[in-house]
Image (tube, helix red, strand yellow):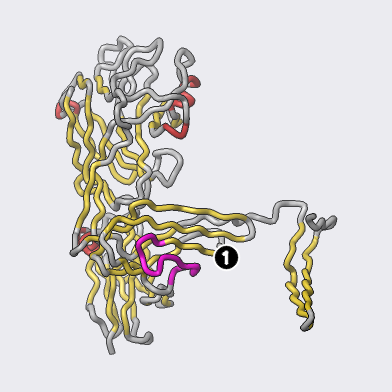
Amino acid sequence: MGITYPEEGTYTVKLTVGNNFGTDIMIKEMYITVSVDDPCTDEPTVAFNASARLIPAGGSVQFFDESEGFPTYHTWSFIGGSPSSSNEGSPSSPIRYSTPGIYDVSLTVSNSCGSSTVVKHNYIYVFSSPVGQYCDTITTIKPGEVVEPRVPDGQWGYLAGHNGLKIREYANRYDAHTFSEVSAVLVPLKQVKYDATDSYVKFFVADANYSTPDSILGEKKVFLHQLTKNETNLIKFEPPISVNGPFYVGYKINYPDEDLDGFSDDMLVVGIPMRPNDPAQNQLYMKKGSTWYTPNDFKSINPASSNFSSALPLKPIACLVDIEEIIAENDINIYPNPTNGVVTIKIKDTYYSSFSFEIYDIMGRKVVSEIYKNGFDEFTTDLSNYPEGLYIIRMKLGNLNLNKKILLTK
């Protein structure tokens, strides 16, 4: 039977136990809080990052807890790693991977208000020798599914393309934690027609840590006359678009009506499969006006049709790129390395929307050290008051998260 507390307040709990050898007492002050209103305002949200994800066999990875909501308990699982688990916030010791393979990592955090779990599938790639990059083509189309143009009931045009409903954007969700960037997308087009040589479509990648594809990470404008119908068209993102966890890939279309007959003078069509109306089977998002819909509520924008689930047959070419190569590609220079104290961080390309830096020791503990801006694209810090050893500079440059090791010697 549970203990009932009829009035608001904070209560102490006392436990007394005994046997033939004596008794023992435990007292927990202010252990129970009773409130008319829900006292839980900080339910934790789990998140984590890693110092490297593409490593040779025998290499180690430092994991960093980035959870919010003040979690008090952590449970890590490192399949294939040693140790294979941890209950620390950010594990103080790196996790070693001795056997080549592709491994999941999971973290559960909790506090008195609740818990939160994330499993990052195919997160750590361990090869028999150093590998700078791993790429793959991914899809959410199921084996045996029929992908073909779909005409909305009572409308002209097609899904997923131009139609009488004036749906202007389509996107597909990819629940993949594996990759760090999207370099291209394969687009199988059923139909392409353009009224003018300047008619275009914009292909984009968006952050799927949000519920709708509004947080655009990068996009590319392509003229319709450059595309070919009944073929799979390769759209390259140059430079590749950085991602951090799940992402969307989609496209934005226009509805020019030069002859004012009520129909678009352009036509772009991508086929889709039809699935039962089950949100768990849906990856397709459609934007009409300023609102995103899924096919699971399609009837609300086209009463003549039924609700369903679907996906786009777009195939992103996504890559997991070694951290050192990411830094080189993005022109980040940290010097001198090794250093006896003063360190300079120089950013050669300054198109990032924001910068932030944090410094950790090799045990994963944050080092309190001021980082000063020295000109438009340079930052400096002084580690001379800290013990010599290996340190990690964690950098957030816009949507890109980077880690760089630096050796302090004296």
Residue at the (50%, 62%) spot, across then down:
75
- Indicate the position of residue 49 as horizontal and vertical percent values: 39, 60
Q: Is residue 184 left or right of residue 397?
A: left
Relative to 36, residue 284 above or below? above
Q: Is residue 233 left or right of residue 149?
A: left
Assign the N terminus to one quadrant of the image. bottom right
Pointer 1 local density, CA inside 10 Å: few below 14, some 14–19, many at least 20: few
Relative to 263, residue 309 above or below? below
Residue 84 part of the magenta segment: yes
Residue receiving disc 1:
72
- Indicate the position of residue 208 as horizontal and vertical percent values: 40, 44
Residue at the (27%, 86%) spot, across then down:
409
Q: Nearer the viewer, residue 20 or 106?
A: 20
Circle 1 — which element?
loop
Quadrant assignment, res 24: bottom right
Range of magenta residues: 78-91
| Disc 1 residue type (three-letter) | Thr
Residue 358 in view in this figure: yes
Q: Nearer the viewer, residue 186 or 366?
A: 186
